[in-house]
Image (spheres, rainbow, N blue to C red):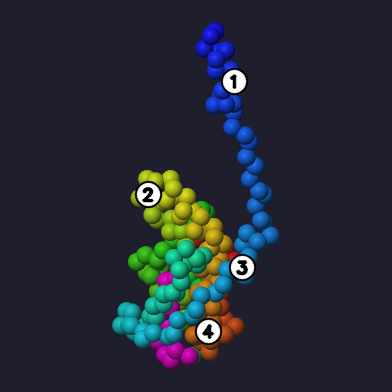
Amino acid sequence: MFVTAALAGCDFLKPPPATTLPPPDLDNALNVDLVPIPQIPTLPRPFKVAGRYQRYEFFFRQKINEPGFKGKVFVTVPDGPVDQQRPCLFFAPAGAPAFGGKGLETRDYQSMMPFVEAGFIVVAYEMDGDSSRILKERNETRIAKIARDYQRAKCGLVNSRNAMALALKLFRKSTRKRCTRLDIAAAAVRV
């Protein structure tokens, strides 16, 4: 009884004050216009894929903490002149969960080659918040950062927009009015 009376006035027995989170800004949650487009790199020298297709590798040069920083984009062009009019397919990596992006893997290249063989220019891009690292991470802070990176990139829409801006600028004659987006398996972004 003496202990209870002595502790009755102590602050550490009081529950912490309730914190209220501000409501999410749903009007701007997926507004990619709030994120600037990175500087579009110049057209690099291509290298041959499967002995007959040209692949261009691009890396956006932006700060690591900016949305859309996962800046690797591969453009694979079928046989023929680069400026020949062709349909263009934007390819998000397969297997991304709803809370994270994904990097490109070897199997992604294999699954897009039938489209290149069919005559499409294929623009493959990575998405921020690489969820393949989540299984390896044991640190909740790192996992939260991965999810935050994905959210800041507007759930991959910024990465998609950056890839489209690149293709439309560098392959304008080839891709004009013939672009579409392909989501294979569980790519998280839907446009």
The question of residue 115 being in magenta is answered with: no
SS class, disc 1: loop
18, above or below 31, in the image: above
Location of the N terminus by quadrant is top right
Residue type, label 2: Glu
Q: Residue at x 51, y 65 (%)?
A: 67
Q: Which residue range is magenta in the image?
A: 70-83
Residue 71 seen in this snapshot: yes
Q: Nearer the viewer, mark 1 or mark 3?
A: 1
Residue 61 is situated, as x and y percent measured from the top left of the image, at 44, 74
Q: Earlier in the sequence, mark 3 or mark 4?
A: 3
Residue type, label 4: Lys
Relative to 114, is 168 on the left or the right? right
Q: Would you call the spot at circle 2 few (<14 residues within 10 Å), some (14-19), or many (20 or more)? A: few
Q: Residue at x 51, y 59 (%)?
A: 150
Rounded to the nearest whole Å, what is the CA distance between mark 1 and mark 3?
50 Å
| Residue under pointer 4 | 169
Residue type, label 3: Leu
Find residue 9 and name its label: 1
Rounded to the nearest whole Å, what is the CA distance between mark 3 and mark 4?
20 Å
